[in-house]
Image: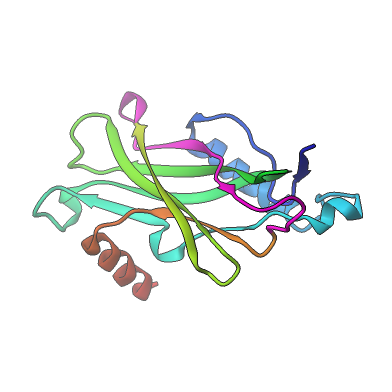
């Protein structure tokens, strides 16, 4: 028998999103987070979802054309802006259904209408020992020359736990897979804020 914990939201579909839809989704999620919309049954509350978080240093990616570093060399930038989901307990472990929302902005140096990004989902034990890290490639297409676009990615990492073991102290980390230069750029931008 599967048990569901809806503490981190509910999953939906995968596909392109408008920036307005992403903003609305973010406002809706922010409004529901602290309103006790989790399970009503105390037995279901005992088996909770792991903590899902977007790694701050890896939440954005900025891509410049090779050799460029100023605004005219910007191909695109993207951000992991939010997530929703739930988890399902089964006899062989816990499946964490996560929808990740990505918003991208095209730059003047982007050739074509599509930007490509790589992000990851990492699972960690309660002591922060990394168990797995899986990479995903995604494309964002800017329709009709629009400057912004977004996607929703559906993921389902599985935590291998024995029956009735609680995943509440496990962690799911989301972030872009960055080059050392991109990470340095992100950290420099954060210091300016």
Residue at point 67%, 48% (across, down): 29
In the rendered view, tell whether residue 181 sits above or below residue 10.
below
Residue at point 30%, 28% (across, down): 145
Q: Is residue 105 left or right of residue 162?
A: left
Q: Is residue 71 left or right of residue 41?
A: left
Residue at point 65%, 57% (across, down): 50
Image quarter for residue 68? bottom left
Residue 117 location (% of width, % of height): 32, 43
The residue segment tinted magenta is 142-167
Is residue 160 shown in magenta? yes
In the rendered view, tell whether residue 73 sits above or below residue 149.
below
Outermost residue to the bottom: 191
Q: How is the image coloured?
A: rainbow
Residue 189 location (% of width, % of height): 32, 68
Q: Nearer the viewer, residue 115 or 74?
A: 115
Is residue 74 shown in magenta? no
Outermost residue to the left: 67
Image quarter for residue 185? bottom left
Quadrant placement of the N terminus: top right
Residue at point 18%, 34% (across, down): 111
Quadrant placement of the C terminus: bottom left
Residue 149 location (% of width, % of height): 41, 36
Q: Nearer the viewer, residue 133 or 26?
A: 133
């Amino acid at each position: 028998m599967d048990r569901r914990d809806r503490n981190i939201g509910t999953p939906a579909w995968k596909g392109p999103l408008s920036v307005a839809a992403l903003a609305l989704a973010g406002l809706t999620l922010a409004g529901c987070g602290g309103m006790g919309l989790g399970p009503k049954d105390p037995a279901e509350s005992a088996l909770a979802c792991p903590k899902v978080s977007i790694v701050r240093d890896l939440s954005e990616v900025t891509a410049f054309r090779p050799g460029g570093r100023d605004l005219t060399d910007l191909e695109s930038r993207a951000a992991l802006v939010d997530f929703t989901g739930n988890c399902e307990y089964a006899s062989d472990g816990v499946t964490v259904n996560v929808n990740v929302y990505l918003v991208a902005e095209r730059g003047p140096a982007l050739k074509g209408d599509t930007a490509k990004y790589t992000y990851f989902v990492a699972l960690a034990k309660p002591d922060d020992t990394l168990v797995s890290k899986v990479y995903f490639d995604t494309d964002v297409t800017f329709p009709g020359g629009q400057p912004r676009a977004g996607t929703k990615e559906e993921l389902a990492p599985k935590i291998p736990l024995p029956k009735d073991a609680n995943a509440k102290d496990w962690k799911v980390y989301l972030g872009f897979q960055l080059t050392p230069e991109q990470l340095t750029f992100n950290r420099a931008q954060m210091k300016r804020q």
